[in-house]
Image (spheres, helix red, strand yellow):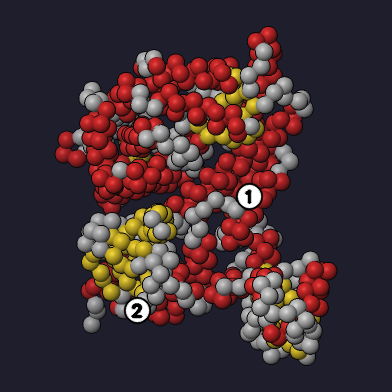
Amino acid sequence: MKNSIAERITDFIKNYPPFDNLSYTDLYKLAVETNVLYLDKDETLFNQGKPHNNFFYLVNQGAIRLYRQEGDKTLEIEMCDEGDVFGLRPLIVNENYNLNAKAYEESIVYAIPISIFNEQFVNNSEISKYLITRFASNSTTRFSQEENERIFADYKRTRQTDYFSSKIGTLMTTAISCNHKHTIREAALIMSENKISSIFILKKNKPTGVITNKVLLHTVATGKFSIDENVKEIMGTPVITASADISIAEAQIIMLKKKVENVCITVDGSPDSKMLGMVTQQDIVASLSNNPAVLMKQITRARTISRLRDLRQQLNDLLKRYIDQHISFTHTLTVVAELNETINQKAVELSVKELDKTPPCKFSFFALGSQARKEQLVPTDQDNGIIFDDVPEEEIESTRAFFMELAGLITKNLHSIGFEYCPAEMMASNPKWCLSKTEWKDKFKDWIYNPTEKNILLTAIFFDFNFVYGSKKLVDELSASVYEHTKENNRFFMFLAQDALKSPSPLGFFRQFLVDQDGAYKDHFNIKQRAIMPLIDAARILTLQHNLKGVNNTAERYYKLRELEPQNADVYEACAYAFKALLKFKTKNGLASLGDDDGKFIKLESLSKSDKVKLRRCFKPIKSIQEIITVRFQANI
């Protein structure tokens, strides 16, 4: 007899990765064992630091907030929406939860038993792809060297290496070893001579242990063991081994589960057979041609603009795969923003070399708008400027002429890479936006103390600026000047607030979406103008009011505001979630669109009922934040 609840679960989960790679029969078996959880708003599902249970989760309705507590600081990780999977990593690598999971609103969640899921996972390469990618998305910080070595999970098949069918033996390198009778000193000398970070200990050509730099640091360097003692006193056992015939993906899973940096390859895959070589995480990273870490390295090594154009296209491909795989959007945003910023930095660097002239003074190229806020996913038009150091009055025009020539080259090269020219010419190649430090300070001062309609429009564009290349000190000085003149400037804030309130709720009577009434996008919903920009504008004015420096990203601004104003924490948290959800909608639409609108115009008939419900949920915080702006700045319009 069929189980109607299991059928409903199956019909739902079959539409989402990784379940879309399983047969209906297998999914039904999984669904029969799945528990349905009904969670009230703010109800906790699991806690950071607690042992994992035997289930991972998939959101059916509502939203689940994932966050990490670090002392008094709350680090937001992700808001899981319909179809999102979470809580899987601790089960695979057998570790405690490192996040908290709490219902953001009333939610229905499916609790799926890992034991049943693993039956499907073991021999399914598509499931392996999904898990690898999920593990990679565990990071939310900037691309440090350590992070680069972790973020290796892009599953694109390449000519160099097929990640899921190529054998690990193709990446195997010679493993440096010593005899089990050697002293720690002798082992350390071998490591030093070969410039390696680990050494295997052999007994009859079989691996019995391993010593790493970290082990030496915590044992010998601390004085706990003498350097003249036998290696067996500090070596790690057992050695993690594998056969040369397993796939690269399988080797990576082993490293994740065992929390090791390398795998020892032996004849039969066990520690009881002869050692053949080794494979490290770095070997795997180097074998892949299109993953974030390697892509970052390729960008920094690029020597031509055409090469940067190719890499920018690879970044688009990476973004699409991350979106398709339901990778954490917070992680996706961080990865793409860092790679995008590096492309811009490299483009300026190559332009300076191409000009082949020495700049007459220090300068800085800076980004504006979405790129400055690290929110540009699908490439849009350029928004940038140049600030150069003050020079004697008689030299200023010749200095400007030099930087105008450089700016023209930069904007041309950025256009070649894929960043369209700004129709309004908000670019460094426009002499209005290629100014000395004093000229920029005077410009901002004029906007602040003479808040005409035009000046307020310009502040909305130029007040989000971020250093890209050159002298960061110049940009920092400009930022300090802006905050000095806006501090407690109530008149300016009132005008800025009125501008921020010009876009009312995106819904009209009967909760219908407000669409464009004419033009090329008649009957389309402008998600950027009607939903995203009101949240951006509100975050900017509140950030300025609090004199909050160094935080440009809209979601991060709301998280900071939540800490500064606990009485409004719920509203700010809702705004951060809504902003990221709306940006994800826009990004998905931009990737699917064949036009040139970067995804901001949405055909409502293309949306499912579920998508429309999600959008309406995102609109609620807009009304709440605009009410705060209206009351605080007396900005009734």
The quadrant holding residue 260 is: bottom right
Q: Is residue 521 left or right of residue 165?
A: left
Q: Mark 2 belongs to which amino acid?
A: Lys
In this rendering, the answer to whether 479 lies above or below 58 is: above
Q: Please give the residue where the numbered disc 2 appears in the rendered image.
A: 29
Q: Please give the residue where the numbered disc 1 appears in the rendered image.
A: 296
Q: Mark 1 belongs to which amino acid?
A: Met
For the C terminus, the quadrant is top left
In this rendering, the answer to whether 604 lies above or below 197 is: above
In this rendering, the answer to whether 357 lies above or below 312 is: above
Secondary structure type for disc 2: helix
Q: Residue at x 39, y 27 (%)?
A: 487
The picture places residue 17, in percent across and down from the top left corner, at 42, 63
Secondary structure type for disc 1: helix
The picture places residue 333, in percent across and down from the top left corner, at 48, 48
The picture places residue 88, in percent across and down from the top left corner, at 42, 69
Q: CA distance from mark 2 to mark 1?
A: 42 Å
Q: Residue at x 44, y 52 (%)?
A: 329
Mark 2 vs mark 1, foreground winner is 1
Q: Residue at x 32, y 59 (%)?
A: 64
Q: Is residue 67 left or right of residue 164?
A: left
